[in-house]
Amino acid sequence: MEEKTVLQLKSLLPDIRENVFLKDHATFKIGGPATYFIEVRSKEDLIKAVTAAKTCGVPFFILGGGSNLLVSHEGFSGLIIKVLHEKGIVLKPGNIVEASAGVEMKELVSFCIDQALAGIEWSGGLPGTFGGAIRGNAGAFGGEIKDSILEVEALDDDLKVRQFSNKDCQFTYRSSIFKLNNWIVISAKLQLTPGDKKVIADIAQSRIDYRKEKQPLHLPNAGSVFKNCDLKWFSKEWQEKLAHVVKQDPFPVVPTAYLLSECNLKGTRIGGAEISTKHPNFIVNVENAKTQDVLDLIEVAKKAVKEKYGVTLEQEVHYLQ
Ligand SMILES: Cc1cc2nc3c(=O)[nH]c(=O)nc-3n(C[C@H](O)[C@H](O)[C@H](O)COP(=O)(O)OP(=O)(O)OC[C@H]3O[C@@H](n4cnc5c(N)ncnc54)[C@H](O)[C@@H]3O)c2cc1C
């Protein structure tokens, strides 16, 4: 980066830090340093940071909870903008809850339980921020964030703040208009329904318990590495053979964990990374894993599934380089 650019960026954003290791901001605990790093706590500061990066021509990346990220060992040459929340969560008339992008999902779920509002309890135990969940239309146990979104406020390429109705968001399986265009979620409103506080709390807790039982939460990871596979991708013959494992989540899918298990990949290790024995769609950082260890395991998994089932796995984890 030219010295002139650096000086300009530092004058526009006096709070930026240099050489911040991204492994400390990613649940995988993998990843080299970002040249520049800033934490933003308000809509104004978020817009200011993005504007500064664009003005200076510096590449930037929006970081939420870092729970869906594999960061390159070389790190990121540019500005990382970490979105934290300031304004938090607000209850509005009509069972509407508004929250900033940087609010953690677990905080949002707790708030909804306190208010006896139902709708997002399926996300009990979902790591990351509200903004990250909206961008990737996070989902589990048959629910998706799109089911409760009323409106999203986001920043487009021209730094224009825009409002998006649920339909405008173009939510699909693990995707949205924000993901397709790299637009930045600032805040959003959820339309919820009144319910029984204990019932809502019990559902959220059962999801947390399920995750503890089935997922390798004792080791650093980034959640499911691959999306589940659409049943339609398989040949007629495989569709019949796999019928017993198909689940609706949110349409008929074959769990990728099952396919990886059938390919005997559980416990496959490269360097410090391993395909989890507990949940094979998770790669775990067993011992100082390098980014390349994970990338190599991803290739091993893709190749095995392609050879056995004829389908190409789609990656869910975002690779930041
Ligand atoms: C143990 C574990 C279990 C998980 N289980 C699930 C699950 O059941 N279902 C599921 O869907 N996911 C799951 N995940 C993945 C992850 O939690 C979700 O994808 C989550 O929504 C990512 O949010 P984040 O804030 O951590 O995003 P990050 O990891 O920080 O970022 C992910 C992507 O979102 C972008 N982003 C972040 N914030 C914003 C914003 N405000 N505006 C625009 N883009 C933004 C980033 O630029 C990046 O491209 C799991 C992860 C872990 C570690």
Image (cartoon, helix red, strand yellow):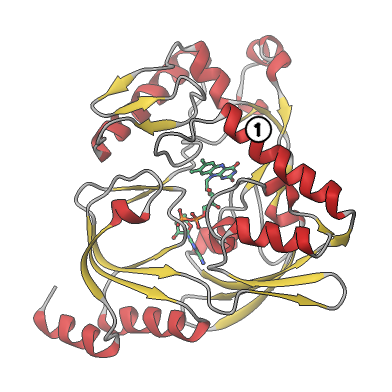
Label 1 CB sits under 8 Å from any ligand 1 atom: no
Q: Using the rendered view, name the quadrant where residue 228 is placed.
A: top right
Mark 1 burial class by Cα count in 10 Å: few <14, some 14-19, many 20+: few
Say if 96 sits above or below 45 in the image: above
Q: Which residue sits at x=31%, y=34%? A: 295
Task: Say what secondary structure mark 1 lies in.
Answer: helix
- The image position of residue 254, as x and y in percent, is 64, 24
- Which is more toward the observer, 301 or 198? 198
Say if 4 sits above or below 210 in the image: below
Total of numbered circles in the picture? 1
- The image position of residue 3, as x and y in percent, is 10, 81
On screen, residue 166 versus residue 101, left or right, reads right
Say if 244 sits above or below 131 in the image: above
On screen, residue 280 versus residue 152, left or right, reads left
On screen, residue 205 versus residue 105, left or right, reads right
- The image position of residue 7, as x and y in percent, is 16, 86
- The image position of residue 246, as x and y in percent, is 71, 22
Q: Which residue sits at x=51%, y=75%? A: 156
Disc 1 target residue:
210
Q: Amino acid at mark 1?
A: Tyr
- Which is more toward the observer, 54 or 276? 276
Q: Which residue sits at x=31%, y=54%? A: 24
